Image: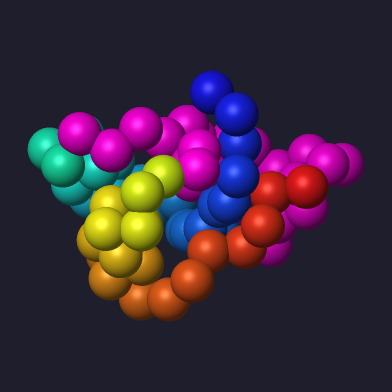
Amino acid sequence: MEKSFYYSVPWSDVGYLKETLLAMEIPFAIEQPSDRLPLPPGEVAIVFPDMHVRIYNHVRELFGGHGKRYE
C-alpha cells in the first residue's frame, strides 16, 4: 500500500475506528510512532492510501477533519 495521509489517534480509539473502517471496506494500516512518523505519546497513526474523493469524505467525516500528509 502506498501511503498518502494519516490521522493520529489515541490507542483507546483504535478498536472502534478499525471496526468501522473494516465495515466500510476502506484500506488502512496502523503504525507506531517512529523517526519518520513522530506522534504524541499514547497515540498511533491510522494510515491511508490515495483514494477517491467520495471515500475520502467518509474518512474525513469519521475522523472529524482532514488527515495529515504522510511524508
Residue found 61% across the figure and 36% down from its top = 3
Applied colour scheme: rainbow
* Residue 32 drawn in magenta: yes
Q: Main secondary structure of the magenta part?
A: loop
Q: Quadrant of residue 32?
A: top right
Marks counted in the figure total 0
24 on left or right of 7:
left
50 or 63, which lies in front? 50
User: Does residue 16 show up?
Assistant: yes
Residue sitting at the far left: 23
Residue sitting at the far bottom: 65
* Residue 36 drawn in magenta: yes
Residue found 50% across the figure and 38% down from its top = 49
- Residue 26 in percent (x, y) is at 28, 38
Task: Please say if 57 is above or below 34.
Answer: below
Task: Please say if 12 is above or below 33.
Answer: below
Residue sitting at the far top: 1
- Residue 1 in percent (x, y) is at 54, 23
User: Does residue 15 show up?
Assistant: no
- Residue 56 in percent (x, y) is at 35, 57
Residue found 53% across the figure and 64% down from its top = 67
Residue found 16% across the figure and 42% down from its top = 24
Q: Which residues are magenta?
A: 25-50
12 or 7, which lies in front? 7
- Residue 9 in percent (x, y) is at 48, 59
57 on left or right of 38:
left
